[in-house]
Amino acid sequence: MTPGHQCVSEERLREDITANAEFGAVSTEKGHGRTVLTGTDANRRAREYLVDRFDAAGLDIRVDAVGNIAGRWVPEGVAPTTQAVACGSHLDSVPEGGIFDGVLGVYSGLEAVRALQAADATLDRPIEVVCFTEEEGARFSNGVLGSSVTSGKRSVEDALALEDDDGVRLESALSDIGFRGTGRLDASAWDSWLELHVEQGERLQDAGAAVGIVSAITGTIRCAVEIEGEANHSGSTTMAERTDALAAASELVLEVERATNDVVAEEGDTVVGTVGSLDVRPGAINVVPGRAELGIDVRDVKYEPMERIIERVQRYLSTLEAERSVETTLERPYDIAPSAMSERCMTAIRDAAAAVDVGSLSLHSGAGHDTMHVASVTETGLLFAPSRGGFSHSPREWTDWSSCATATRVLTAGLARLARE
Ligand SMILES: [Zn+2]
C-alpha cells in the first residue's frame, strides 16, 4: 500500500492556493497580497470556491451558525459517528495580507484528504477539514472568532451580535453572503486536531528545517491604560505647575520595557512586552498633554511571568500617581492563557516528519492561532511551514510551493497516524 503522504500533489495544492489568492487580490510593489474581511464579496467567493472543492472531493459539507465551514470524509468501513480527526485554519485575512496565512492550513487539509483517498488509506476515524470564521479579527472581533465559538468560549448569540465599525452585525453580514448556517461546530467532539500554518518568522529558514513542531502557543494579556493629567497652555504654564499626561506615559513605556527585560532574564526570550499604541489628547504642539491612552501587549508560553509584568505595571502606575499627581486606570480587556500542545499530537507530527524523511524543529508560537481555542477542549498539534524572510500580514509573505507540499505531506502522515489509533 502507498503511504498517503506520497499521493500529495504539489500542483493541486498550488492550484487551490493560487485560485484563492485571486479573491480580494491586491497587487503591490512588494508582491501579491489579498484583503479578505469577513462577510465581504471576496470572502463569499473564497468560501464558495472552498465549498466547490470540498464537494469535488466528496466531503459532507456543513456550515454552522457563525459561518464556520467543515468538510467531513468518512473512509470506507468507518462508522460515521466515530469521532473525527480534524484539521484546518482560516481564509480571512488582514487588510493587504499574504496569500498563505490560514489558506495553507485549509487547503493542505483538503489535499491531505485527497491524498489519503488516492492512496486508499485504511483509517479508523473520519477526517474533517475546517475553515474558521474571522481568525484575523479585522472586521468584527479581536480575532479567533469562529474557533472561540467551536470551543464554547463564546456563545453563538454573542458572536452573531458583534458589530463592525459601521454597525453591521456579523449575523447579517453572513446572511448577505449566504454563509449563515445552523447549529454549532463543536471542537470537543473531535478526537484530535492539527493545524498547519506558515511560521511568520525565520527560525525554520535559519535552521534549514522543513517543518516546525509547536510545543506551545503563547498566551496574551492586553491592557488599556489611561493617564489623566491636565491640559494647559504650553507657554504660560510653568514647569512646576504642570500635570503632563504624556511625560508620565513615557515613563510607563520605559517601565514596561524594563519589567519585561527583567522577566526575560529569569524566564528566557519567550517573554515579550510591547506598548504598541499611544493616543495623546488634545495632541496639539502648544498644549501640555492632558490625557494619554496606552495599549500594552504582553505574551509568554507561561501565564505567571506575564502576570509578574502586569503587576509591575500596576505598581508603577501608583508611583506615577504619587510622584506626578496624575490619575490612572488600567483595564484588561483581552486575556488568553498560553496553550500547550498535546504529547500525542506532537509525537504524531514528529513520527510523520520522520516518515516523510524531512528535518523538523521544535519551537513555540508567539502568534495566536485558532488552535489555541481548540486546545482548550481536545488534543491539538500545530505545525509550521517555513516563511521566506519571515514576512507575514504583508504581500511579501511567501512560502515556496515545494515547502508547502512538504509540510502538507507531514500533515497528511500525521493525520493518518492519529486516525489509525
Ligand atoms: Zn493565520
Image (tube, rainbow, N blue to C red):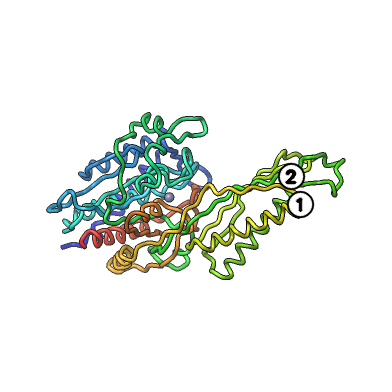
Q: Where does residue 344 sit, x and y in percent of width and height?
A: 30, 65
Q: Where does residue 36 sit, x and y in percent of width and height?
A: 43, 39
In this view, the residue in front, 393 or 403, is 393
Quadrant of residue 145 within the rendered picture = top left
Other residues around mark 1 within 10 Å, as few (<14) / some (14–19) / many (≥20) = some
The residue that mark 2 highlights is 229
Horizontal relation, residue 272 to residue 58: left or right = right
Q: Residue at x 27, y 67 (%)?
A: 355
Horizontal relation, residue 287 to residue 65: left or right = right
Q: Where does residue 125 sit, x and y in percent of width and height?
A: 20, 55
Asked whether disc 2 touches disc 1, contact meaning CB atoms under 8 Å apart, the reply is yes
In this view, the residue in front, 378 or 116, is 378
Q: Where does residue 377 sit, x and y in percent of width and height?
A: 34, 54
Q: Is residue 276 visible?
A: yes
Q: Is residue 33 visible?
A: no
Which image quadrant: the C terminus? bottom left
CA separation in Å, label 2 and label 1: 9 Å
Q: Kindly state the secondary structure of the residue where label 1 is placed.
A: helix
56 vs 267: above or below: above
Horizontal relation, residue 113 to residue 209: left or right = left
Q: Residue at x 46, y 47 (%)?
A: 98
Q: Kindly state the secondary structure of the residue where label 2 is placed.
A: loop
Instruction: Tell me which numbered mark, 2 or 1, is placed earlier along the sequence.
Output: 2
In the drawing, what numbered circle is on residue 324?
1
What amino acid is at disc 1?
Arg
Horizontal relation, residue 301 to residue 318: left or right = left
Disc 2: residue Cβ within 8 A of ligand 1's nearest atom = no
What amino acid is at disc 2?
Gly
